[in-house]
Image (tube, helix red, strand yellow):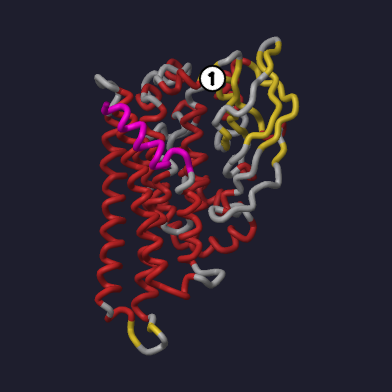
Amino acid sequence: MRDAARALVPVLAARARAAEAAGEVPGETIAAFRAAGLTRVLQPRRFGGQGGPFALFSEIAETLAEGCAASAWVYAVFGEHAWIVANFPEPAQRAVWGPTPAALVCASLIPRTVATPAPGGWVLSGSFPFASGAAHADWAILGALCAGAARYLLVPMRALRRADDWQVLGMRATGSAALVAEDVFVPAEHSVALESLLTGTAPGRAVHPDWGLLRAPRYLLVPYSLPAVAIGLGAGALAEAAAVLRTRRARGTVALADSEFVQVELGRAAAEMAAARALLHEGRTAAEAETTGPDPAARLAAHRAGMAFAVDLVRRAVERLCGLCGTEMVRDGSALQGRLRDILTIATHGVVSPREAFGEAGRAML
């Protein structure tokens, strides 16, 4: 799996500009993910997946991002959502993977609307934003309030339509447009209480009793899913900036590679990237090993804070690298400019918000 991901890095890099222009990851990339089995790392073995370790899934997302952050993001979405589907009742899992064993699932998870009770289930209407990878998905998980409690509802993509609202600064190729539902009926067995995922007690635990990952609180591992893309993006930006600085000359005469200032700042950026990578690698290994503890709230907060800090390190490092490269990065089509826009966009995601993550960690400590 590692070799397959590494082999895709130059392929994704070559496709990145066209993917951004198209506003979605190309079908050839999704086909390559599927052919290599990458999207099934967190799919249960009972339904043809690998039932693998979360750390491996996170590592693959990190590696792919060295080539194209948006492609890696879509991969991470599909991989993580297979794990979420595995938490649903068995009828829902059969509906997704029975007809299409390699089915892909996008999502808009934050409950932003209220579902209406109906005999045997719920009726769902509304707009559900940020559904990354929806153009290639077979199903969608939509968060909603059901009788006052947050639930995830599983809906086939044929019952939804995509809005044209993804005109953004960065991560354009994720195609993260909103999904629109109009009086869509969702059977009760195609839903799961969010609280059960947060406590590791969802129905899927009984469906797959030998897969320990389903006993882990969801928010213990979430910080190592999409944020891993930012770390891989940083590695790609560092390599691209170093390549520019080796040959670039200031005002056409002074070699930047001979500047002590450039050397110090490049070294500083590399150290920031290494620190971020260490936080990711050590954190995800520890998180997957943790299932119990005296203060789960403090542990969850610490993992989230660590990754919020790591992504902020990468953001600052990429900004510094772009400053060093000067006018080289302002041109449309510059790979480094694309990295900057992507990391600024990733940094707006709630899971890596420093204010929220650090505040949560501080409250848990106090």
- Expressed as whole percent of the image width and height from the top left, the position of residue 338 reads 50, 62
The answer to whether 173 is drawn above or below residue 209 in the figure is below
Task: Give SS at disc 1.
Answer: strand
Q: Residues within 10 Å of mark 1 (few under 14, many from 20)?
A: many
User: Which residues fall within the magenta stretch?
Assistant: 349-366
The answer to whether 34 is drawn above or below residue 183 in the figure is below
- Expressed as whole percent of the image width and height from the top left, the position of residue 135 reads 64, 45
Query: What amino acid does circle 1 point to?
Result: Val
Q: Is 350 contained in the magenta span?
A: yes
Horizontal placement of 159 versus 250: left or right?
A: right
| 218 vs 169, nearest the viewer | 169
Q: Residue at x 56, y 63 (%)?
A: 17
Disc 1: which residue: 192
Dominant secondary structure, magenta: helix
| 309 vs 27, nearest the viewer | 309
Extreme residue in the bottom direction: 253
Q: Quadrant of the C terminus?
A: top left
- Expressed as whole percent of the image width and height from the top left, the position of residue 259 reads 28, 79
- Expressed as whole percent of the image width and height from the top left, the position of residue 230 reads 41, 50
Q: Is 85 contained in the magenta span?
A: no
The answer to whether 339 is drawn above or below residue 97 in the figure is below
Extreme residue in the right direction: 182
Horizontal placement of 254 versus 186: left or right?
A: left
